Amino acid sequence: MTADIIDGKAFAATVRAKVAEHVARLKAEHGITPGLAVILVGEDPASEVYVRNKGKQTVECGMNSYEHKLDPDTSEADLLALIDQLNNDPAVHGILCQLPLPKHLNEDLVINSIAPAKDVDGFHISNVGLLATGQKSMVPCTPLGCLMMLRDKHGSLSGMNAVVVGRSNIVGKPMAQLLLQDSCTVTIAHSRTKDIEALCRQADILVAAVGRPEMITGEWVKPGATIIDVGINRIPAPEKGEGKMKLVGDVDFDSAAAIAGAITPVPGGVGPMTIACLLANTVTACCRAASLPEPEGLTA
Ligand code: NDP
């Protein structure tokens, strides 16, 4: 294996430490404590774990965490009323509504009812438009985490060829916008892309956000490329025992790491950066609300 491993777990810890430092300064110098409100509708076990982790890490960084757990059959009107209340609560600087929502709720309507300045997920259409036009926005957490790791690895990304595999609104598209903003030459690939392997082989930076276990192999990789594997896939692991499962990315780690210059592992790569960037976005939102300077290195 030749590739350097990009340690997302360690990097996320440095991001959280920076957040905590900034929070302590906001409290000491301005008497402000950033607050993050997380709304969970229903009882999806995976979502419950995410929400618990978010709350725990929010508090560990010195911020206030407000959890709102709503019944699975909560009406749209009641959910929108809660969001309106949080939009108008000065103690709340960030609002996140855990997705997916139960089927009877209109996700677009709900997301777009969050005040853009408090939209720490960066999914509101105003933030999408601001990012696309190169203006100050709230940036989606997962792509922001990927960008931070790439900048840390390379310094300037200017002029690099980047291929993003996947065009979702939460990962692929904002990732491509961020790379373009950092002056990469960006191609977005998806399920209809022709000769995707040859395209990926031209990438200095290859971001995989597909949701297909180990789809991208070493043969797709340009020697020395940096690979960011966003995928989180749970697959059977008979080698660990009957019925056991394991997490893998969208990249076949062993074959890709033999060719790449650097690669994020799964788990321990992009995953831990996502919550760290949520905390970073909350501090950024708080500073903007108070017209204070934003923390350095925590935004795009
Ligand atoms: P989506 O399902 O929304 O999007 C997947 C994208 O992959 C689509 O654009 C689709 O193309 C494309 N795609 C599917 N099959 C192929 C193929 N055979 N060849 C090329 N492209 C293909 O997924 P998300 O963006 O939400 O998530 C992607 C992965 O990232 C998942 O594994 C998810 O679990 C993980 N994830 C990880 C996070 C983290 O914190 N680390 C956060 C968010 C997601 P098309 O549009 O043409 O259908």
Image (spheres, helix red, strand yellow):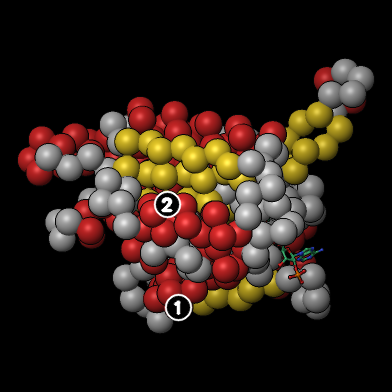
Specify the farthest residue to the bottom: 133
Q: Tell me which amino acid carries mark 2.
A: Ile
The 10 Å Cα crowd at callout 2, few under 14, some 14 to 19, many 20 or more, is many
Residue tagged 1: 129
Depicted 138 relative to depicted 97: above or below: below
Q: Tell me which amino acid carries mark 1.
A: Gly
Indicate the position of residue 275 as horizontal and vertical percent values.
Answer: 47, 42
Q: Residue at x 17, y 56 (%)?
A: 290
Specify the farthest residue to the left: 29
Q: State the mark number for residue 95.
A: 2
Q: Quadrant of the C terminus?
A: bottom left
Q: Residue at x 79, y 70 (%)?
A: 191
Indicate the position of residue 78 as horizontal and vertical percent values.
Answer: 55, 54
Please name whichever residue, 21 or 288, is drawn nearer the observer in this view of the structure.
288
**Is tag 1's residue or tag 2's residue first in the polypeptide sequence?**
2
Label 1 vs label 2, nearer the camera: 2
Please name whichever residue, 207 or 212, is drawn nearer the observer in this view of the structure.
212
